[in-house]
Amino acid sequence: MKIFSLGVDQLTNNEIKLAGFTVIAQHVLPEPEHAGEHLLMVTSEQVPVQDLNELRRRYPDSQILYIYLHKGVRGYQAVHMKCESLGIFFMPPRSTSAAIVDKLRYMLEDEHKESSNLVGFFGSGPGIGCTSVAKLFARRIAASGLRVILLGLDLYDPGYDRRAAVSLDKLRPRITGKMLHDEDFDGWIKQDGYTYLPGNFDILGAQDYQEEEIEYLLDRAGGSADVVIADFGSVPESAAWYVGMQRSALRMMVTHPRHEYRLQPLMELAGHMDLQPQDFQWIINRSNVEELTSPKNLALRFGSELLLELPYYPSFPESLPLGKKELQMVDSKVHALLVSLGLALEVRKKGIFQ
């Protein structure tokens, strides 16, 4: 099947070709008889939203992928709904080339999917403990003997109390120029058995980051470690947050029952990226703080999996002082995580596999 591409940048077209698809770049919409039962991929800059009805009428036999380019976390839900009603597939703003390739594979029923060793941590709000929990998992995975890289990709909070000699913003010129080398990772901070890159200290430049920069960093880190843990923070209006949602093999949502009102819009936003509640593992931080809604009931209400509950430690934001029982629970979840990534074997215990 051919893909007629209108308004899509050349780099993305090249990535689609490298994935094995036949792409025909267009300067204008193709004739309907030429498009036939092939796939038509158009952007909102070439076909305005108000012209979607006419587009569907003109190409009744073609599959259509509509790439909406107007950035922002608000305002495109109605566009997505309109596409659904017309039988048009939808890609939200900030969609990366990898996400578009995955969407095309889904549309064309191609089951091939590249493996990923990226575990993304997302918070339901600032101060929820996303960075601390990401460091906990990085530490326990490293303790199993694997090479772990932890990336601070919360562009609005570096996740590090001290001014570091190396950080995301200091490394950014090399990321932008795609000049990262294997030896560069050796200069990052060594912490609790893993390699750590603190996040962005340049808060004023937080919105200047581009999705391609984050993708490049994730690809380079993924090739230099067994597991990449990334702290993507809790602010959706961030290039790193969007890329993390699209690229992570496992998505950990660090939250608390008090954040129920925050979780609703976050889950709706994830839905526009073809992510369902079951695509998230929830970690309830500060679970011993009294709330009307229990962690289990909260997860059940949204349809997500409750992975872990961590108690509240007011004096230990950096390194959670877990007891022996809690560490055993964390390690059992870490082992399950590594099994799912193909980095550990299932173990038989009392007649069942775990």
Image (cartoon, rainbow, N blue to C red):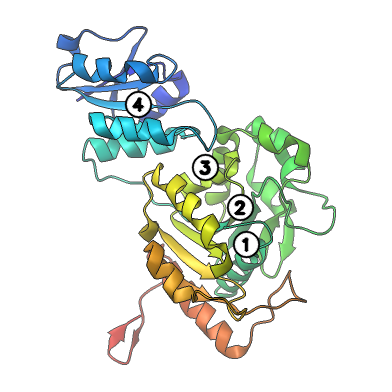
Tag 3: amino acid: Val
Find residue 79 and report its image quarter: top left
Cα separation between marks 1 and 4: 34 Å
Cα separation between marks 2 and 3: 13 Å
Query: Would you name the residue on which mark 4 appears?
Result: 66
SS of the residue under disc 2: loop
The residue carrying pointer 4 sits among few (fewer than 14), some (14 to 19) or many (20 or more) residues within 10 Å by Cα, namely many
The residue carrying pointer 2 sits among few (fewer than 14), some (14 to 19) or many (20 or more) residues within 10 Å by Cα, namely many
Mark 1 in CB contact with mark 2 (< 8 angstroms): yes
Cα separation between marks 4 and 3: 19 Å
Question: Which quadrant does the C terminus fall into?
Answer: bottom left
Tag 2: amino acid: Ser
Question: Would you say 55 lies left or right of 172 here?
Answer: left
SS of the residue under disc 1: helix
Question: Where is residue 77 drawn, in percent x and y?
Answer: 42, 36
Q: Is residue 89 visible?
A: no
Query: Would you name the residue on which mark 3 appears?
Result: 243
Q: Is residue 139 visible?
A: yes
Find residue 53 and report its image quarter: top left
